[in-house]
């Protein structure tokens, strides 16, 4: 094989993960452009938010897939790394804030409260970009300044933060949140953005879902995964808003504490 053939094959390998990244970026750009269009009423607004949430989920799947495909095909490149980071900044840093702002379109809020929401949205987006910059620098320097625990991220991953805040905005705009007063929805969205923004730039360690390990037999694991998948698909079809909300926040309030406690226990046992 000549050097030219090898170079051409390497370029074809790089195209596949970059195409997936471009698809995720297109989802984010479509969310941004679609959020700028007005709606005729609360029902249309809810349908619009559901459609944007589905696009966000598609972009999250693409974000997980492009890196995996690049590693499998051995097609990792500097261009792909920068492209992925910029795509995440748009899709998970800017687009979710616009969905949050869009979700309060049907509420009558004054200039003061709308300004507060804009400030919180800017803080969320800024924290998301800072999270991506820190991740890129630590990955580039191979964690020489600080060794991260295996299978953990420093700070809440930005796709998880985007899913959480969008699911909250969708939940508060749906009939499931009818018991919550409209006057409380705006403060909840603002607090949610500030909380997620703080978690993204925090020094806490969040687990990678791909690194989670369970001591369980293969047969039982397959059965449990099958049951979980059926329940998840049924829930998505019949109760998309509720399931999306529960799954998005489960990572923060369920998986993260359990993984942090397990890591602390393992570290303590090793020291002893």
Image (spheres, rainbow, N blue to C red):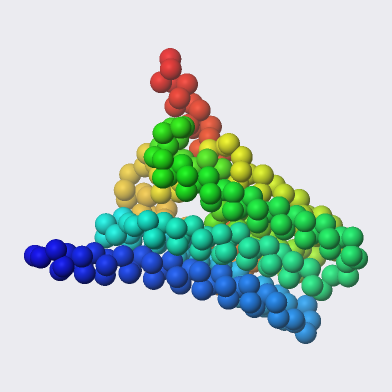
Question: Vertically, is 142 above or below 232?
Answer: above
Return the residue found at the far left: 1
Q: Residue at x 65, y 53 (%)?
A: 126
Relative to 88, 65 lies left or right: left
Question: Vertically, is 232 above or below 256?
Answer: below
Q: In the picture, which quadrant includes the N terminus?
A: bottom left
Relative to 270, 168 lies left or right: right
Q: Is residue 91 visible?
A: yes
Quarter holding residue 203 = top right
Relative to 87, 141 lies left or right: left
Q: Residue at x 59, y 49 (%)?
A: 130
Relative to 203, 118 lies left or right: right
Q: Residue at x 73, y 70 (%)?
A: 102
Q: Residue at x 36, y 42 (%)?
A: 216
- As rendered, which of 63 and 234 lies closer to the eye? 63
User: Where does residue 239 sit, x and y in percent of width and height?
Assistant: 62, 68
Return the residue found at the far bottom: 40
Question: Vertically, is 206 above or below 159?
Answer: above
- As rendered, which of 147 and 250 lies closer to the eye? 147
Quarter holding residue 163 = bottom right
The tally of labels here is 0
Question: Vertically, is 257 above or below 22?
Answer: above
User: Where does residue 8 sit, x and y in percent of width and height?
Assistant: 21, 69
User: Where does residue 110 sit, x and y in percent of width and height?
Assistant: 91, 65
Return the residue found at the far top: 272
Q: Is residue 252 visible?
A: no
Q: In the picture, which quadrant includes the C terminus?
A: top left
- As rendered, which of 70 and 272 lies closer to the eye? 70
User: Where does residue 86 sit, x and y in percent of width and height?
Assistant: 51, 61
């Amino acid at each position: 094989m000549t050097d030219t053939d090898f170079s051409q094959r390497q370029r074809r390998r790089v195209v596949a993960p970059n195409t997936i990244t471009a698809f995720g970026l297109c989802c984010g750009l479509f969310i941004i452009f679609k959020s700028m269009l007005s709606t005729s009423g609360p029902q249309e607004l809810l349908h619009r938010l559901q459609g944007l949430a589905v696009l966000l989920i598609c972009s999250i799947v693409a974000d997980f897939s492009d890196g995996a495909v690049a590693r499998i095909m051995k097609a990792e490149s500097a261009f792909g790394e920068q492209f992925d980071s910029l795509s995440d900044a748009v899709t998970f840093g800017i687009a979710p804030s616009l969905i949050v702002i869009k979700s309060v379109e049907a509420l009558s809020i004054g200039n003061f409260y709308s300004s507060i929401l804009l400030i919180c949205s800017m803080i969320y987006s800024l924290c998301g970009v800072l999270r991506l910059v820190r991740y890129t620098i630590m990955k580039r320097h191979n964690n020489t300044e600080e060794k991260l625990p295996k299978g953990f991220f420093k700070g809440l991953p930005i796709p998880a933060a985007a899913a959480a805040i969008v699911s909250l905005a969708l939940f508060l705009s749906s009939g499931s949140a009818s018991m919550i007063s409209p006057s409380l929805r705006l403060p909840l969205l603002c607090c949610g953005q500030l909380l997620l923004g703080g978690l993204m730039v925090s020094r806490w360690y969040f687990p990678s879902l791909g690194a989670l390990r369970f001591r369980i037999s293969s047969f039982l694991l397959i059965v449990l995964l099958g049951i979980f998948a059926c329940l998840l698909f049924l829930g998505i079809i019949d109760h998309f808003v509720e399931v999306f909300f529960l799954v998005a926040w489960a990572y923060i309030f369920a998986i993260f504490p359990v993984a942090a406690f397990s890591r602390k226990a393992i570290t303590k046992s090793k020291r002893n």
